[in-house]
Image: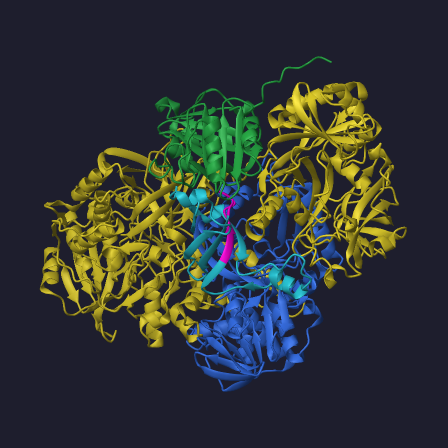
Chain colours: A cyan, B blue, C green, D yellow
């Protein structure tokens, strides 16, 4: 599987670390809503089809990426930095 | 249906093998059952078998989307062991081990359970201590375990590299001699035949497409072969849990589906009679009775239902295998395949009543479900029949995650790819 | 107590740095391997929106004008700079003391300066088979069209995280973690045996 | 007469004689021969034995699909088993032996298995061996007893036991177009793509480019097809943007067009060049893939179809046209399609007599009939072969009138004398790579074959792969595919012209001749057509059940020969069309691939070594090294004759009495910089860091999000916005990722940079009552007295001219300092410290003494922070700030994490003055015979020189409440049982007076 990192270009999956379901929302740090915390930590969407997920390009630029990837075909339909893309990469093309 | 035995074999051979009957019937689904078991894998079939055998509940249908045993029971690397650290796991898997020891007889079907031993190699003193902790935990629960020295290991498997100049020298290992392997497909077929002989309907090519509900209560399923009603619906579809539970309106669970690859080499004259695992990484290997080395390693590490993995894990596993057995560089990989695993948030399974009324759920086997097949079915049948867990699966609840009562064998927390 | 001179830095490669020709060199030496031992290796990071400021700082201090775009870089022989991650750059100088120069210019409003002069080991591979040898280790496209002169890449050879800059048509500089450097060097030498290599 | 070398023909170099041995007998062949062709040329008919019945087998094919002729190649002590003789190129000195026979290939005792005959049919193992209900062999024991003997007979080739000395390498490649297969379709595709300017890789599994052109005997552009192929390959070679890879099997099609291939770089050479690998594992990321992989001829299923001398028709044509070898002199053919007629003509031309062509079809075209005449063969249309005769070679066949529609045999059988029978059961496109990529095959009733579906954008097919079996079509499709893959458009072009014999691509739908005798479907695994019907009878009717129950398709050819015939027989038994039985999805690899190539450079060198700056010093000074993760760290610096215990006791004792120094460079170090660095640390640590003043350090604890303890370490505030965080050695990478995740995903608003600086700094911890004096003796530029350097204070100075950073903190419990300097100066500073320490009795100490002193102090490490324990379990709850939320704060009080029966950290003292063992359990009641009732376990243990006792840290239920009580260490694994006292984990200097000084 190749993942096209917005900074580094297409790289082998081995360079990336999977950080799981990208639909989870971390509660406010001060929140005492234990159910919300539990749901955030333990309960995952696990669709057969397109999945919104977080990956880190740990063997490259180390940026975290938000991807939509199909869990049936492994096809990746979108990749973007989780953090707003740096101006530097916006102004230039792919490597 | 006739008993299998050496006599039936001889009698049929004289007849040109023309009189053998199907190992299980191919019935059409009835309109309703006492229990519907969704999933004709190892655990579903064993659940049906024990419902009939232990609880006298025989008005049972097992619904299988494809052919029985098409999931992980037919895709795993066949290791059976009870060498767990944490007591809820050790107890459960040891019960399973005892079932395995008499399973062929029980089922009148040779599942080829071979107690050839499982050896975990240790490469650092700290790891050896870790294994000692686990082995002693087993011994304190009446389970066999022993530590082996490198010399003893070398004697057991002469092809292994115990030299001190290896990158990760072998300092010893934890051996469970009663552990071993079985013929995976035979387990599915044996349970299917056993359940069928007790009246269970095994219905293949019958995909569940939805759940029938009365309010919150589950009252049956819709399938590719029509509606089927049941007093109780048991979902036991590890690998597809996410998909099936979504049909019941539950789209979030403490589970991620991951792909695990497995490998077999070309057939070789047997030289490895023990299951052995590499400790600096993840690789487990055994040699089948046909002579192929059957082995695997880590999951690929991302959500997948594709039963297809990628190249990096292939390379990792081969590298680790050759670190153990440096003479096998010229041996050739024959086939690889993938299975989809329910990776739970603590690495341990879920066998429970619920989460909806009328429903029972068995899932979260990570990649260790094969060895659990007998105990999983046994406990799940108990839970379904009695509406309360057996003491062996009392800890395997769905709410344990939220309550913080985790059974985290590897201590990795809610990071499924690391379990 | 006697005052000491600052000693020369120890190379992590020393016992395995064997000057001379190796491998299948009888058929020609197709790559040259060297440890370049720059005095300064820095990592600079800009806060989002401050990248241009940081790039001007790099230009001001090193004279290197970095092209826009991911992995853009430049080199003049004595100094080198390239982007290796969004808003982050590696800057290298033959001489020591570059961190102090940048610390004056890269204010907290722009970003940060991290000195890795000791923490990274710089290895150069040059020669007609440099791309071939590197392709044995790294899964990135080394063709000039895909990896232009001056550009930088972050990638990994198994456990060894590596930054690579193309510093010539057939020359690449690699920056690896010091603790892994000797192991990586041995791997690189092993991979170079097929084409014949010389350590200078 | 047996097989022999023809007088002319083939591309082998008849001027060059190659000497090799097979089963110890010396043979000669020619350059360009495979082992199979060379042995055939020498008249050998018996190549191997089948798996189950040990039946004698000849060579079936001429390629990668060979199921019978498997050999082991010996290179000195090293063995490479299960190689198809059809794929082994001979070279001088090649030593090959046959397999799966005892004692010899000709006389194999295993052949007695055949007597088991019908008892040993499919499913045999499942129906017996269940064992008695009592006695020593009860339950599964009986099976294991039998299995012992079964395993003795199992397996094909034998693996060696000496390490493989060969080199294996990996190669990463990128291209626009990968063309797989170099027959006419592949050559045209590569040419078309190259002319569009695309970067092209052309991979061919054979040594020679050309595929079927090498043996078809056709004419392309007025020249022999083989010459045409050589010319085109030569032209391709001159393109800068084309890489030609001969002897390269593309075996895997992974996600994103990541293609795996194995190049046999030097197998065919007597000796490889220096540094030259044996195999190269190519990983090719191709923007587009052209699959021009051709097709595989299928055997027919009829009684005696496995006898040596029965061969695939095209294989014989290959032997004749490529190698100049005749597989027999009186050759009969048995076919259900036209393609075999070409083989007949070719073999006739090469000098064999074609005694008969047996065709199941009664109606034949005029062209086909004329080919039969050209071959001077008796044409027996509407006939079938019903038996073969002979022993280890063929002597004749029996034929009978056959109705292809009903499958009925009528009339009397007739014997025909023949020493070779060629069969053709039609062709199956080689769709494996498309199937691996997820393409679902589609059954073509006309072609009687599974064809690939429409291309899906990642790959495009051409030629026989798509079911277009003529060379004309291959050329046209190849060019179109090449253009399309390169993103070009089909410009009108003059295509090469082909002269070929006419050939109807559609076979008769006949797969099996049902007659008396064993008809083999899977040759290697001895699966017969009766086994398939037995599977049907017993309900194993889906294709996967069929395969698993009978082992059909599981042999080394992975069903390349048996798959479709097996399905066809099952379909007939079910009375259903073939596709309703199911289609198999092909899995990687397409053909078997060496494990060595997949491990590549990691073979023999699994993972890199991580070394501290002082590594060489440690080795030179007698350290015994300990591998910790990837790092190497000194375990002890043993003196001659010392045991490990004696060494660490001496080191620890000396440290507590005077001073000791240890290399702590492996500690994870992370620079945390930026305006929000302090805020960030407040969020990730359980305790406060924003209140820490510049020039001071603080011990910090991190939890995971779920509230479980994660890692600990000290963090130093070097500047207002500049922190140096240390982590445990083992968790450095995980902590880094954890921090990056929160910065990037959860708190992107924070202006913080984090950088791994582990390798930037060499670290030495020097501790003991004299540590300060030693520093005072060598540090310049700063005082190191209590005022300048209080506990947790940081100063900057120089040692031996080198800038250093010194923090006064203690792991050992002594007055201690961590001295950091640039890693390149690590050894220099280390040596200066040791020199300065000499007058004070400074010792170097390793991990064992380090561990001993930390146990004495009751500090926790990874053995206690094991991913299950909480801060409370470890008595670190004092570090949980109540003033702020932090990672884990909301979840750390869940019921399971505060339960009463949790394991808590305690100390243990051995009461019998004997060593305790790590991993030992703790029980209240000792029962050596039947250990039970564990209340916890030992996490770390040592002999404490400070206490003069064997002590341990343990995690025990009840924890603190048990202080002062007795229990027992129970270690049945090592037979160590004994009484212990449960005490506080702070054994030594609990109020810290020594370290505070």
Res. D661 image quadrant: top right
Compared with B211, B369 (above or below) is above
Compared with B131, C152 (above or below) is above
Extreme residue in the top direction: C2
In-front residue for pair A47/B128: A47
Q: Which quarter of the image is occupied by the C terminus of chain D? A: top right
Compared with D777, D114 (above or below) is below
Residue A79 position in % (x across, y down): 44, 53
Residue C85 position in % (x across, y down): 48, 41
Main secondary structure of the magenta stretch: loop
D783 relative position to D308: left or right:
right
In-front residue for pair D730/B391: D730
| Residue D156 can be seen in this image | no
Q: How many marks?
A: 0
Residue D312 position in % (x across, y down): 26, 56
Would residue A55 be counted in the magenta stretch? yes
D88 relative position to B57: left or right:
left
| Residue D588 can be seen in this image | yes
C185 relative position to D553: left or right:
right
Extreme residue in the right direction: D964
Compared with D26, B262 (above or below) is below
Residue D531 position in % (x across, y down): 40, 68
Res. D300 image quadrant: bottom left
Res. D728 image quadrant: top right
Name the residue located 10 percent from the left edge and 61 percent from the top edge: D367
In-front residue for pair D347/D712: D712
User: Residues in magenta?
Assistant: A53-63
Would residue A62 be counted in the magenta stretch? yes
In-front residue for pair D3/C197: C197
Extreme residue in the bottom direction: B31
């Amino acid at each position: 599987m190749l993942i096209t990192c917005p900074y580094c270009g297409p790289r082998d999956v081995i360079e990336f670390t999977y950080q799981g379901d990208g639909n989870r929302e971390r509660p406010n740090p001060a929140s005492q809503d234990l159910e919300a915390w539990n749901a955030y930590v333990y309960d995952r969407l696990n669709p057969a089809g397109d999945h919104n997920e977080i990956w880190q390009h740990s063997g490259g630029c180390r940026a975290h990426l938000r991807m939509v990837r199909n869990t049936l075909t492994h096809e990746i339909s979108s990749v973007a930095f989780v953090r707003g893309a740096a101006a530097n990469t916006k102004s230039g093309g792919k490597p | 249906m006739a008993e299998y035995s050496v006599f039936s074999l001889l009698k049929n051979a004289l007849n040109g093998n023309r009189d053998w009957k199907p190992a299980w019937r191919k019935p059409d689904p009835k309109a309703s059952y006492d229990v519907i078991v969704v999933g004709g894998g190892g655990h579903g079939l064993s659940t049906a078998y024990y419902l009939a055998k232990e609880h006298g509940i025989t008005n049972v249908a097992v619904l299988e989307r494809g052919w029985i045993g098409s999931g992980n029971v037919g895709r795993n690397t066949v290791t059976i062991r009870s060498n767990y650290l944490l007591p809820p796991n050790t107890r459960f898997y040891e019960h399973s081990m005892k079932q395995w020891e008499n399973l062929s007889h029980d089922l009148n079907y040779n599942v080829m359970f071979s107690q050839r031993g499982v050896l975990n190699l240790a490469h650092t003193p700290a790891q050896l201590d870790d294994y000692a902790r686990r082995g002693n935990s087993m011994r304190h629960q009446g389970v066999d375990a022993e530590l082996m020295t490198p010399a003893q290991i070398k004697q057991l498997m002469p092809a292994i590299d115990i030299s001190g100049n290896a990158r990760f020298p072998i300092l010893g290992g934890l051996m469970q001699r009663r552990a071993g392997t079985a013929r995976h497909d035979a387990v599915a077929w044996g349970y299917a035949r056993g359940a069928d002989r007790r009246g269970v309907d095994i219905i293949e090519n019958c995909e569940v497409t939805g759940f029938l509900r009365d309010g919150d209560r589950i009252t049956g399923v819709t399938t590719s072969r029509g509606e089927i009603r049941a007093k109780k619906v048991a979902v036991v579809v590890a690998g597809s849990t996410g998909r099936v539970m979504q049909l019941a309106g539950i789209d979030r669970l403490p589970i991620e589906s991951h792909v695990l690859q497995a490998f077999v080499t070309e057939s070789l004259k047997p030289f490895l009679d023990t299951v052995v695992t590499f400790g600096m990484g993840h690789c487990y290997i055994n040699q089948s009775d046909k002579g192929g080395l059957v082995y695997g390693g880590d999951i690929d590490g991302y959500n997948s239902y594709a039963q297809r993995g990628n190249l990096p894990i292939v390379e990792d596993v081969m590298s680790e295998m050759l670190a153990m057995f440096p003479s096998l560089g010229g041996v050739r990989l024959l086939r690889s395949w993938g299975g989809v695993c329910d990776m739970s948030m603590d690495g341990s399974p879920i066998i429970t009543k619920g989460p909806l009324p009328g429903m029972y759920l068995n899932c979260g086997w990570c990649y260790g479900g094969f060895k659990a097949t007998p105990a999983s079915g046994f406990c799940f049948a108990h839970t379904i029949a009695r509406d309360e867990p057996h003491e062996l699966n009392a800890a395997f609840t769905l709410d344990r995650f939220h309550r913080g009562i985790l059974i985290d064998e590897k201590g990795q927390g809610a990071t499924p790819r690391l379990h | 107590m006697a005052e000491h001179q600052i000693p020369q830095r120890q190379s992590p490669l020393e016992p395995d740095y064997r000057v001379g020709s190796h491998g299948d060199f009888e058929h020609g030496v197709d790559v040259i391997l060297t440890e370049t031992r720059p005095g300064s290796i820095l990592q600079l990071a800009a806060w989002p929106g401050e990248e241009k400021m940081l790039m001007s700082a790099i230009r001001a201090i090193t004279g290197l004008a970095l092209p826009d775009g991911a992995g853009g870089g430049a080199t003049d022989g004595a100094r080198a700079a390239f982007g290796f991650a969004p808003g982050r750059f590696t800057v290298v100088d033959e001489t020591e003391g570059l961190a102090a120069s940048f610390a004056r210019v890269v204010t907290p409003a722009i970003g940060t300066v991290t000195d890795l002069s000791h923490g990274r080991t710089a290895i150069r591979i040059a020669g007609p088979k440099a791309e071939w040898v590197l392709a044995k280790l790294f899964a990135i496209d080394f063709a000039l069209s895909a990896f232009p002169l001056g550009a930088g890449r972050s990638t990994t050879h198994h456990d060894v995280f590596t930054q690579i800059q193309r510093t010539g048509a057939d020359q690449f500089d690699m920056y690896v973690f010091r603790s892994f450097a000797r192991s990586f060097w041995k791997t690189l030498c092993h991979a170079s045996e097929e084409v014949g290599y010389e350590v200078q | 007469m047996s097989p022999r070398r023809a007088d002319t023909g083939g591309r082998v170099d008849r001027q060059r004689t190659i000497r090799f041995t097979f089963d110890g007998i010396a043979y000669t062949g020619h350059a360009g021969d495979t082992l199979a062709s060379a042995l055939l040329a020498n008249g050998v008919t018996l190549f191997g034995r089948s798996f189950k019945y040990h039946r004698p087998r000849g060579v079936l094919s001429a390629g990668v699909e060979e199921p019978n002729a498997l050999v082991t190649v010996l290179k000195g002590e090293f063995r490479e088993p299960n190689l198809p003789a059809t794929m082994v190129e001979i070279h001088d000195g090649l030593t090959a032996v046959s397999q799966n026979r005892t004692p010899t290939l000709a006389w194999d005792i295993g052949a007695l298995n055949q007597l088991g005959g019908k008892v040993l049919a499919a499913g045999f193992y499942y129906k017996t061996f269940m064992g008695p209900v009592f006695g020593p062999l009860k339950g599964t024991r009986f099976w294991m007893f039998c299995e012992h003997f079964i395993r003795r007979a199992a397996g094909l080739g034998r693996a060696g036991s000496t390490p493989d000395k060969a080199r294996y390498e990996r190669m990463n490649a990128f291209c626009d177009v990968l063309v797989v297969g170099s027959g006419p379709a592949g050559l045209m595709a590569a040419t078309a793509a190259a002319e569009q300017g695309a970067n092209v890789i052309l991979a061919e599994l054979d040594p020679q480019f050309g595929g079927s052109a090498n043996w078809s005997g056709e004419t392309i552009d007025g020249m022999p097809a083989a010459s045409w192929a050589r010319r085109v390959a030569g032209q391709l070679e001159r393109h800068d943007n084309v890489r030609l890879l001969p002897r390269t099997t593309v075996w895997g099609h992974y996600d994103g067009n990541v293609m795996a291939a194995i190049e046999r770089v030097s197998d065919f050479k007597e000796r490889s060049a220096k540094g030259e690998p044996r195999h190269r594992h190519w990983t090719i990321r191709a923007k587009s893939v052209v699959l021009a992989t051709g097709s595989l001829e299928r055997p027919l299923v009829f009684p005696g179809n496995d006898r040596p001398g029965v061969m695939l028709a095209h294989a014989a044509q290959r032997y004749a046209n490529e190698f100049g070898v005749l597989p027999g002199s009186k050759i009969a053919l048995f076919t259900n399609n036209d393609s075999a007629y070409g083989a007949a003509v070719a073999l006739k031309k090469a000098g064999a007599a074609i005694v008969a062509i047996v065709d199941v079809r009664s109606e034949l075209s005029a062209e086909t009939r004329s080919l039969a005449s050209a071959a001077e063969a008796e044409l027996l249309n509407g006939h079938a072969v019903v038996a073969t005769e002979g022993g280890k070679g063929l002597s004749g066949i029996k034929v009978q009138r056959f109705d292809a529609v009903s499958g009925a045999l009528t009339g009397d059988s007739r014997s025909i004398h023949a020493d070779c029978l060629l069969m053709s059961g039609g062709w199956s496109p080689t769709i494996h790579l498309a199937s691996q990529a997820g393409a679902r095959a589609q059954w073509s009733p006309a072609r009687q074959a599974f064809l690939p579906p429409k291309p899906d954008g990642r790959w495009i097919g051409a030629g026989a792969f798509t079911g277009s079996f003529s060379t004309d079509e291959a050329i046209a499709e190849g060019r179109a595919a090449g253009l399309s893959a390169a993103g070009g458009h089909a410009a009108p072009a003059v295509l090469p012209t082909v002269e070929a014999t006419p050939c109807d691509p559609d076979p008769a739908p006949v797969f099996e001749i049902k007659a008396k005798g064993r008809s083999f479907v899977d040759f290697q695994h001895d699966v017969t057509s009766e086994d398939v019907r037995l599977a049907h009878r017993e309900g194993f009717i889906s294709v996967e059940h069929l395969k698993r129950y009978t082992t059909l398709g599981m042999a080394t050819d992975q069903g390349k020969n048996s798959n479709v015939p097996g399905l066809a027989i099952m379909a007939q038994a079910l009375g259903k069309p073939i596709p309703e039985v199911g289609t198999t999805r092909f899995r990687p690899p397409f053909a078997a691939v060496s494990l060595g190539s997949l491990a590549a450079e990691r073979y023999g060198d699994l993972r890199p070594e991580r070394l501290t700056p002082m590594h060489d010093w440690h080795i030179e000074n007698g350290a015994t090294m300990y591998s910790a993760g990837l790092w190497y760290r000194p375990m002890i610096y043993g003196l001659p004759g010392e045991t490990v215990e004696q060494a660490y006791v001496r080191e620890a004792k000396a440290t507590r009495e005077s001073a000791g120094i240890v290399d702590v460079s492996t500690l994870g170090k992370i620079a945390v910089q930026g305006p929000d660095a302090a805020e960030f640390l407040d969020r990730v640590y359980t305790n406060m860091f924003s209140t820490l003043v510049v020039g001071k350090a603080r011990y910090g604890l991190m939890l995971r999000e779920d509230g479980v303890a994660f890692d600990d370490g000290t963090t130093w505030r070097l500047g207002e916005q500049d922190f140096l965080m240390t982590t445990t050695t083992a968790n450095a990478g995980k902590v880094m990722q954890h921090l990056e995740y929160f910065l990037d995903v959860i708190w992107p608003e924070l202006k913080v940079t984090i950088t791994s600086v582990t390798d930037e700094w060499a670290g030495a911890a020097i501790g003991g009552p004299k540590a300060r004096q030693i520093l005072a003796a060598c540090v310049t530029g700063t005082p190191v007295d209590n005022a300048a350097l209080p506990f947790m204070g940081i100063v900057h100075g120089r040692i031996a001219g080198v800038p250093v950073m010194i923090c006064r903190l203690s792991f050992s419990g002594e007055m201690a300092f961590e001295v950091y300097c640039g890693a390149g100066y690590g050894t220099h500073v280390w040596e200066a410290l040791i020199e300065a320490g000499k007058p004070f009795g400074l010792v170097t100490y390793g991990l064992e003494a380090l561990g001993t002193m930390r146990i004495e102090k009751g500090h926790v490490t990874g053995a206690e922070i094991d991913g299950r324990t909480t801060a409370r379990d470890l008595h670190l709850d004092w570090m949980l700030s109540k003033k702020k939320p932090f990672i884990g704060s909301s979840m750390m009080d869940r019921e399971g994490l505060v339960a009463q029966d949790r394991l808590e950290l305690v100390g243990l003292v051995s009461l019998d003055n004997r060593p305790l063992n790590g991993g030992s359990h703790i029980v209240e009641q000792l029962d050596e015979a039947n250990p039970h009732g564990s209340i916890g376990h030992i996490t770390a243990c040592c002999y404490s020189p400070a206490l003069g006792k064997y002590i341990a840290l343990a995690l025990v239920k009840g924890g603190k409440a048990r202080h002062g009580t007795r229990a027992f260490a129970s270690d049945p694994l090592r037979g160590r049982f004994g009484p212990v006292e449960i005490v506080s984990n702070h054994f030594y200097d609990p109020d810290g007076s020594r370290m505070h000084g």
